[in-house]
Image: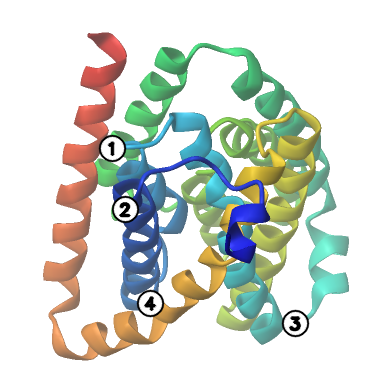
Amino acid sequence: MSPLDLLPLPDYTLAQWSLVVAAFLLAGLIKGAIGFGVPIVVISLLTLALPVKDAIALVVVPAFAGNLLMMREGGRVREILARFWPLMTAKAICLGIGAAILATVPTRAILLVLGVVVITFSLFGERLPRLHLRPRQEKVAGALVGAVTGLLAGTTTIFGPPVVMYMTALRLDRATYVAAIGTLWSLTNVLTLVAFGATAVLTLPLFLASLPLAPVLLAGYPVGRWVRQRVDDRVFRRLVMAGLLVSGGRLLVVALI
């Protein structure tokens, strides 16, 4: 008996474990190449062979590891939290509600929501509308964005596009944008871990299984950067979006049949 046999890991087959590793490696590659896509790529692939709630739970710890690197690069954590506290307060509350929904609703409902989110992202993720917010609108708009993205994070872990739209509407400089994304994404991951643990979405076996997936995800980053230097960026993005569109369609079909 090996030491691994003593750990309470999920009872997956070799084929399922292979898909898990491949999904995180591919997500890391895509993240390194185009800068986003970890939860949506991982969940789209893992739902081919794993229960949807397992797929959602497994992504949180590795995504947190990746976002910590961005937070370290951006810094200015206190400044970001002082500015965006309305967004994070609303997100924390609604994320808890979303996690409670995820823990109790039927699998078909989760697949349906995921399918809609993935298809919407694949069609409009590269064409987000450019808005403009005045300083006096920032806090109210931030709270609204936080509420919406909190529900999305709690039910799917996919919450990026609305926050990116909000950050773009504030006309942030690049340094502030990178710092905000790193801090807010990392804090969202922490809140998600707490909420998923409290609602038993993230069980001990799933948590232990997700730990070694963090270095797998990070290993894909340099490969993605290598790809970015050698493949036309627009072509690669369109291929990724096309793949997500097909995956989102599959999720809808599975949910409705």
Nearer to me, 131 or 247: 247
* Alpha carbon distance from label 4 to label 3: 23 Å
Q: Earlier in the sequence, mark 1 or mark 4?
A: 1
Q: Nearer the viewer, mark 4 or mark 3?
A: 4
Q: Which residue occupies the foreground of this view, 172 or 156? A: 156
Q: What residue do we see at 34% from left, 51% from top?
A: 14
Amino acid beneath label 1: Leu
Residue at numbered disc 4? 220
Q: Amino acid at mark 4?
A: Gly
Q: Is residue 127 above or below residue 168?
A: above
Please say whether residue 170 is visible from this viewpoint: no
Q: Position of residue 246 (x, y in %)?
A: 16, 39
In the picture, the quarter occupied by the C terminus is top left
Position of 113 compared to 150: left or right?
Answer: left
Which of the marked residues, 2 or 4, is nearer the chain's N terminus? 2
Specify the label residue 75 is tagged with: 3
* Residue 173 locus on image (x, y percent): 59, 78
User: Is 16 in front, or is 111?
Assistant: 16
What residue would you read off at disc 1? 48
Sooner in the amino-acid sequence: mark 1 or mark 3: 1
Residue 79 position (above or below residue 158): below
The dot on residue 19 is 2
Marked residue nearer the N-terminal end (2 or 3):
2
- Secondary structure at numbered mark 2: helix
At 64% from the left edge and 40% from the top edge, which residue is drawn?
145
Quadrant (top left, top right, bottom left, bottom right) of the N terminus: bottom right
How many residues crowd around disc 2 within 10 Å: few (fewer than 14), some, or many (20 or more)? some
Between tags 2 and 3, which lies in front? 2
